[in-house]
C-alpha cells in the first residue's frame, strides 16, 4: 500500500516534536543482534538483525587469475539480493535499481576503506590470487537494510577462514576442512555504514520502512577509525531532495556522535576472537 | 468459552459424527468434520468452524473498512483496502451530490476514507460513504494490524475499543480490514493508543484480556 | 559355485552418520521467521536449511495475467550462493526453475485455488545451507508457511528424499550418501505425500531402481512423511 497522505503528514508532525511512531528518538538505533556461522558451506557467514530487519551474508572464496591492473591483488565481488521474501514491495526478476545501487554502495565501502588487504590475498604474483565473493540476502525488510547489510558483510569477513589451496592442482580442495587462517583484514579500517534520512526538519538514523519511503533524501557514510576519529571512505546521497548547509552540519555532527557511540563497541563484538 | 478452543491445522479431523455441521473453514468427509485452514477450532451447538488466526481480510457486506484512494475514475474512485481485490466507490454513493468535475476535489489520490461494504464480487467490493461517520479521514495517523485480531480490538459491543479511547484519550476508528485510524491533539496519546493496540494484538488469545489491557495502559506514562 | 553378489547383498550396510535406514536426520522447525510476510517458516533437516515466505492471496500484476476462474500459485525456489561448497552464482538457473515448478505442482494440491480468482499466492523458498534434500526441506517449510499465512488448505504437504545406496533403501539422504558410488551407486528419490489423502504430490527419481525397490521406497517415504507431518503440526500448534 502506498503511504497515505495523512500518514506522511503525521510522521512529519511527530518528527517536529522529535518523536517517532515506535517511540524512538531521531538519533536512536533499534537493537542490533549479530550471529556468525549461519551457513557452514560458506567460508564465513553471518546474520544481522536491526530491530526486525534481518540479512544473511555468506563469503565464498576461490582461486583465480588476478586482473591485469592488479597482478598481486586478490579480487572482491559484492552482491546484494533484495529477495522478494523479505518484503511485499520486492519483485521477482532481475536486480532492481535499488538492489544495484545498494550493492555498489556496499562494494565501495568495503573496497575504499582499506579493510581488506588485497595484497594479502596473493598466492602467486601474476598467476594465482584469492577471489572473494560477498553475497548478501535480505531476509526481512523492516527498514534500513543498508546498514544491516554493510554490518553483516564485516562480520562475515571477520568470521571467514581460508580454504585449503592445493598447489598441485592449482585449485581449492573442498574435501578438506578449511584452514585456521583468517582473512587479511585491517581491523582499524573496518568501515561502519551509517545512513541518515531527512524527514520534516529532523535528521534520523535507522529508519523504518515507512520512514524510508517518505524521507526527502538519504545519505550513507562508510567510516573507519583514524586516530580515534571517523575517517569517511565512501558517501552516497540518494533520492531527490537536496541538502542545505545547515543540514550538512547536523548530519556530520550526528555522524561523529553515532560513530563514537557505536564503532568501538561493534568492532570489539566483531573481532572478539 | 475460550477454553475448549484448540489450535487446528489443515486436514486434521476436528470432530467425528453425523450430528455435527461443517461451518466456516471446515468440510465434511464422511463421518469427519475436517479443518480447512490453520486456526482455532470452535464447536458451538453442533456447528463446527475454524476461527482464523491469520490470513488476508475477507470482505463481508456491512463491514466498515478504511481504505486509500488509488485512482480517480470518471464515475467514482478505486480504493486499496489491503485485501486482494479493489474497492470501488461510486459517485452515487456519496453523502452529497458530487459533480463529475469535482471527483478529485472530493477524494484525491492518497486520501484515506472510512466506508461501508455494500457488495462483494469476484473482482472486488463496492463501497458507500453515504452514512454518518463515513467519509474522508483528516489528520491523525493509521496503524495496520492483522485483520483477524480486529474482533479483539473492538471487543464485545465495542467494549475494548472504548477502553483504548479512554485510556489513551484518543479517537479510534477500526476498519474490519485491519486498518485503524487514531487521532488526538496530543501526539503522545496517539503513541499510547498504538502501544495499547499492539499489546492487544500480541495477547489476543489470553484470558481476562480487558483487565490486562487496563493494567498495561495504566502503567504507560 | 560363485554366488552373484548383486542378487541379494548390498555394499551399503551402515549409514555414514550411523542412522538406521529409516531414520530421519535431526529436524528443527520454526514459524514466523519473516515478520513482513503473511506466513513464514524455517525447516532444517540435518545440515540442510530451508526458509519459506508466503505472500497472499494478493493482487496479481499485470492484470492480464489474472485468471477469473482461479487463483494462481507461484513458487520460487533459490539456493543462496554460499549454501553449497562451490559457490552458485546468484540469480535463477534452470535447476532452480525446474524445482520451483515441481514444488508448485505439489503445493497446489493442498490449496483451494478456485476460491481466490484473480489473485496470486507467492511462495518464496530460499536455501541458506545445503546438504542434500533441499527441495523436500523447501516443501516442508512452505507447507507450514502457507498454513501460518492462513491460506485455506485442504491438507498439508510433507516431503522426504528417499535414496537407494547400491541396494539399500534409506530415508532422508545426506550429501555424502548422494555421492555414493559403490555397486549400483546412489539413486535419489524426492517424494511428497499429502497429509490426509496420502496421495503423492511430488515424485522424482534419478539413478537405477527395480519396481519392487521403488515400492519399498514409496512405503518408506509415506512413513517418514507421517513423522514429518506430526512435527509440522506440533510447530504450528506452538508445541515443540
Image (tube, coloured by chain):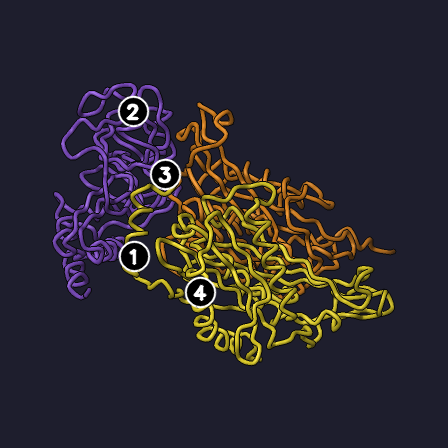
Chain colours: A yellow, B purple, C orange
Position of residue A75 measured from the top left corner of the image (x, y, whole percent): 73, 62
Q: Label 3, label 1: how many angstroms apart (C-alpha)?
A: 49 Å
Distance between the Cα atoms at labels 4 and 2?
Answer: 45 Å
Q: Horizontal placement of C173 versus A118: left or right? A: left
Foreground label between 4 and 2: 4
Q: Is residue B43 above or below residue A183?
A: above
Q: Nearer the viewer, residue C175 or C213?
A: C175
Badges 1 and 4: C-beta atoms under 8 Å apart? no
Classify residue C83 by image quadrant. bottom right
Question: Residue A114 location, x and y as percent?
Answer: 65, 70
- Identify which residue is drawn at 21% across, 29% down: B129
Query: Could you classify mark 3 by the number of other residues whose Cα lies within 10 Å: few (under 14), some (14-19), or many (20 or more)?
Result: many
Element under label 4? Answer: helix
Q: Which residue is mark 3?
A: B36
* Same-chain check, marks 4 and 2: no
* Left or right of residue C73: residue C169: right
For label 4, count other residues whose C-alpha is less than 10 Å away and answer few (under 14), some (14-19) or many (20+): few
Residue ID at (66%, 66%)? A43
Which residue does the numbered mark 4 point to in the structure image? A249
On screen, residue A190 above or below A246: below
For numbered disc 1, what is the local secondary structure? helix
Q: Are marks 3 and 1 on the same chain?
A: no
What label does residue C6 carry, if any?
Answer: none
Q: Which chain contains the residue that carries disc 2?
A: B
Return the residue at label 1: A16
Q: Is residue A41 left or right of residue B72?
A: right
Quadrant in which residue A247 is drawn: bottom left
Residue at mark 3: chain: B
Query: Up-down: is A255 above or below C184?
Result: below
Q: Nearer the viewer, residue A250 or C218?
A: A250
Q: Is residue C223 visible?
A: yes
Q: Which mark is residue B103?
A: 2
Amino acid at each position: 500500500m502506498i503511504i497515505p497522505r495523512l500518514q506522511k503528514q503525521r510522521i512529519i508532525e511527530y518528527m517536529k516534536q522529535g518523536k517517532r511512531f515506535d517511540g524512538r528518538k531521531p538519533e536512536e538505533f533499534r537493537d542490533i543482534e549479530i550471529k556468525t556461522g549461519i551457513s557452514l558451506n560458506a567460508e564465513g557467514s553471518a546474520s544481522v538483525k536491526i530491530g526486525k530487519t534481518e540479512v544473511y551474508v555468506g563469503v565464498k572464496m576461490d582461486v583465480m587469475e588476478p586482473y591485469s591492473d592488479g597482478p598481486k591483488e586478490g579480487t572482491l565481488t559484492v552482491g546484494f539480493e533484495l529477495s522478494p521474501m523479505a518484503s511485499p514491495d520486492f519483485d521477482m526478476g532481475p536486480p532492481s535499481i535499488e538492489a544495484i545501487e545498494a550493492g555498489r554502495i556496499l562494494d565501495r565501502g568495503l573496497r575504499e576503506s582499506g579493510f581488506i588487504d588485497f595484497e594479502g590475498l596473493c598466492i602467486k604474483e601474476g598467476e594465482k590470487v584469492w577471489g572473494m565473493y560477498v553475497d548478501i540476502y535480505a531476509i526481512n525488510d523492516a527498514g534500513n537494510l543498508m546498514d544491516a547489510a554493510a554490518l553483516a558483510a564485516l562480520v562475515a569477513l571477520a568470521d571467514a577462514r581460508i580454504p585449503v589451496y592445493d598447489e598441485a592442482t592449482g585449485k581449492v580442495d573442498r574435501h578438506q576442512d578449511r584452514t585456521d587462517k583468517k582473512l587479511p583484514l585491517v581491523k582499524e579500517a573496518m568501515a561502519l555504514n551509517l545512513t541518515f534520512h531527512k524527514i520534516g526538519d529532523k535528521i534520523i538514523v535507522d529508519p523504518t520502512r515507512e520512514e524510508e519511503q517518505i524521507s526527502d533524501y538519504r545519505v550513507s557514510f562508510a567510516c573507519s577509525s583514524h586516530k580515534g576519529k571517523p575517517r569517511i571512505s565512501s558517501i552516497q546521497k540518494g533520492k531527490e531532495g537536496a541538502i542545505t548547509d545547515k543540514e550538512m552540519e547536523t548530519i556530520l555532527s550526528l555522524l561523529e556522535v553515532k560513530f563514537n557511540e557505536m564503532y568501538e563497541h561493534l568492532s570489539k563484538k566483531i573481532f572478539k576472537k | 468459552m475460550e477454553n475448549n478452543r484448540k489450535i487446528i491445522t489443515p486436514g486434521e479431523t476436528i470432530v467425528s459424527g453425523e450430528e455435527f455441521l461443517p461451518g466456516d473453514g471446515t468440510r465434511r468427509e464422511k463421518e469427519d468434520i475436517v479443518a480447512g485452514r490453520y486456526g482455532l477450532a470452535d464447536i458451538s451447538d453442533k456447528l463446527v468452524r475454524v476461527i482464523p488466526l491469520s490470513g488476508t481480510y475477507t470482505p463481508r457486506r456491512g463491514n466498515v473498512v478504511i481504505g486509500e484512494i488509488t485512482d480517480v475514475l470518471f464515475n467514482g474512485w478505486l480504493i486499496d483496502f489491503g485485501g486482494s481485490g479493489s474497492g470501488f466507490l461510486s459517485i452515487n454513493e456519496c453523502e452529497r451530490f458530487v459533480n463529475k468535475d469535482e471527483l478529485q476535489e472530493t477524494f484525491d489520490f492518497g486520501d484515506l476514507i472510512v466506508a461501508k461494504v455494500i457488495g462483494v464480487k469476484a473482482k472486488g467490493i463496492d463501497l458507500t460513504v453515504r452514512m454518518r461517520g463515513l467519509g474522508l479521514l483528516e489528520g491523525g495517523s493509521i496503524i495496520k494490524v492483522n485483520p483477524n485480531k480486529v474482533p479483539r480490538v473492538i471487543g464485545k459491543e465495542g467494549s475494548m475499543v472504548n477502553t483504548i479511547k479512554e485510556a489513551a484519550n484518543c479517537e479510534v476508528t477500526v476498519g474490519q480490514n485491519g486498518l485503524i485510524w487514531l487521532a488526538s491533539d496530543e501526539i503522545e496519546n496517539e503513541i499510547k493508543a498504538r502501544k495499547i493496540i499492539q499489546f492487544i494484538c500480541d495477547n489476543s488469545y489470553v484470558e481476562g484480556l480487558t483487565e490486562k489491557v487496563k493494567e498495561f495502559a495504566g502503567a504507560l506514562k | 559355485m560363485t554366488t552373484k553378489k548383486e542378487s541379494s547383498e548390498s555394499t551399503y550396510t551402515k549409514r555414514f552418520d550411523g542412522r538406521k535406514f529409516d531414520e530421519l536426520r535431526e529436524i528443527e522447525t520454526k514459524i514466523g521467521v519473516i515478520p513482513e510476510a503473511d506466513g513464514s517458516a524455517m525447516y532444517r533437516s540435518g545440515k540442510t536449511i530451508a526458509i519459506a515466505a508466503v505472500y497472499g492471496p494478493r493482487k496479481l500484476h499485470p492484470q492480464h495475467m489474472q485468471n477469473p476462474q482461479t487463483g494462481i500459485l507461484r513458487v520460487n525456489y533459490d539456493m543462496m550462493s554460499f549454501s553449497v561448497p562451490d559457490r552458485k552464482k546468484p540469480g535463477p538457473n534452470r535447476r532452480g526453475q525446474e524445482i520451483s515448478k515441481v514444488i508448485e505442482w505439489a503445493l497446489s494440491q493442498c490449496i483451494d485455488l478456485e476460491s481466490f480468482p484473480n489473485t496470486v499466492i507467492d511462495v518464496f523458498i530460499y536455501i541458506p545451507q545445503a546438504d542434500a534434500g533441499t527441495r523436500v526441506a523447501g516443501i516442508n517449510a512452505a507447507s507450514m508457511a502457507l498454513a501460518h499465512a492462513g491460506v485455506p488448505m485442504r491438507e498439508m504437504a510433507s516431503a522426504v528424499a528417499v535414496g537407494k545406496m547400491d541396494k539399500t533403501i534409506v530415508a532422508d539422504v545426506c550429501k555424502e550418501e548422494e555421492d555414493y558410488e559403490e555397486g549400483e551407486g546412489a539413486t535419489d528419490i524426492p517424494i511428497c505425500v499429502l497429509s490426509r489423502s496420502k496421495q503423492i504430490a511430488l515424485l522424482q527419481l534419478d539413478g537405477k531402481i527395480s519396481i519392487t525397490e521403488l515400492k519399498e521406497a514409496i512405503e518408506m517415504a509415506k512413513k517418514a512423511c507421517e513423522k514429518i507431518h506430526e512435527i509440522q503440526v506440533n510447530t504450528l500448534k506452538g508445541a515443540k
